[in-house]
């Protein structure tokens, strides 16, 4: 059986940066928690989604994704200054820390603190993996 668009699949994977360091994995020691998604539905990043098409159960594949195939390039418009008084306990913040920000409709998303200024905090709202080449080792576990 070969994975095709519209199939529900389960995959084990390891996500790495180009230096070999792991940023995400579906396996932890002897325990596996496969990622389940519908192929071609846009539930996961484009390059990963497309890589599964044509794989058979138990097939393994190593792929390298450019930012365009993964989380996109860094968008400079998503780096903004926020008044310190809008962030509770702003005196405890440091560059590199992650905060959760909210949208008017109630959705939450992570932002990274870039710089602490006198009256403002510069934050980066890009996805933490934006602008990066990513390497994935994928194993197709199941097709439903």
Image (cartoon, grey):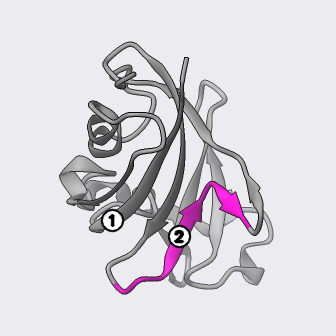
Image position, residue 53 (x, y; %): 29, 31
**Residue closest to the eye, 102 or 38:** 38
- The quadrant of the picture occupied by the N terminus is top left
Image position, residue 57 (x, y; %): 46, 35
Is 24 a magenta residue? Answer: yes
**Residue closest to the eye, 32 or 42:** 32
Which residue matches tag 2? Answer: 23
**Which mark is first along the chain, 1 or 2?**
2
Q: Is residue 34 above or below residue 137?
A: above
Image position, residue 6 (x, y; %): 38, 13
Q: Is residue 80 above or below residue 119?
A: above
Q: Residue at x 40, y 45 (%)?
A: 59
Q: Residue at x 62, y 33 (%)?
A: 107
Image position, residue 65 (x, y; %): 25, 58
Which residue sits furthest top? 6
In which quarter of the view is residue 49 placed? Answer: top left
Q: Residue at x 74, y 81 (%)?
A: 91
**Residue closest to the eye, 46 or 90:** 46
In which quarter of the view is residue 135 placed? Answer: bottom left
Helix, strand, or loop for circle 1? strand
Figure disc tally = 2
Which residue matches tag 1? Answer: 134
Q: Is residue 13 above or below residue 54?
A: below
Is 63 a magenta residue? Answer: no
Magenta-drawn segment: 19-28
Q: Are marks 2 and 1 in contact (CB under 8 Å)?
A: yes
Q: Is residue 52 left or right of residue 112?
A: left
Residue density around tag 1, few if under 14, some if 14–19, many if 20 or more, within 10 Å: many
């Amino acid at each position: 059986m070969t994975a095709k668009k519209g199939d529900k699949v389960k995959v084990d994977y390891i996500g790495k940066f180009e230096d070999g360091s792991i940023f995400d994995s579906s396996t932890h020691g002897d325990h596996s928690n496969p990622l389940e998604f519908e192929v071609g539905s846009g539930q996961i990043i484009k390059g990963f989604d497309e890589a599964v098409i044509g794989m058979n159960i138990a097939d393994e594949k190593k792929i390298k994704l450019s930012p365009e195939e993964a989380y996109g390039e860094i968008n400079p418009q998503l780096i903004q200054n926020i008044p310190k008084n809008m962030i509770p306990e702003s005196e405890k913040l440091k560059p590199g820390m992650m905060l959760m920000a909210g949208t008017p409709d109630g959705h939450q998303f992570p932002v990274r603190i870039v710089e602490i200024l006198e009256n403002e905090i510069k934050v980066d709202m890009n996805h933490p993996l934006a602008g990066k080449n990513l390497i994935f080792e994928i194993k197709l576990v199941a097709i439903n």
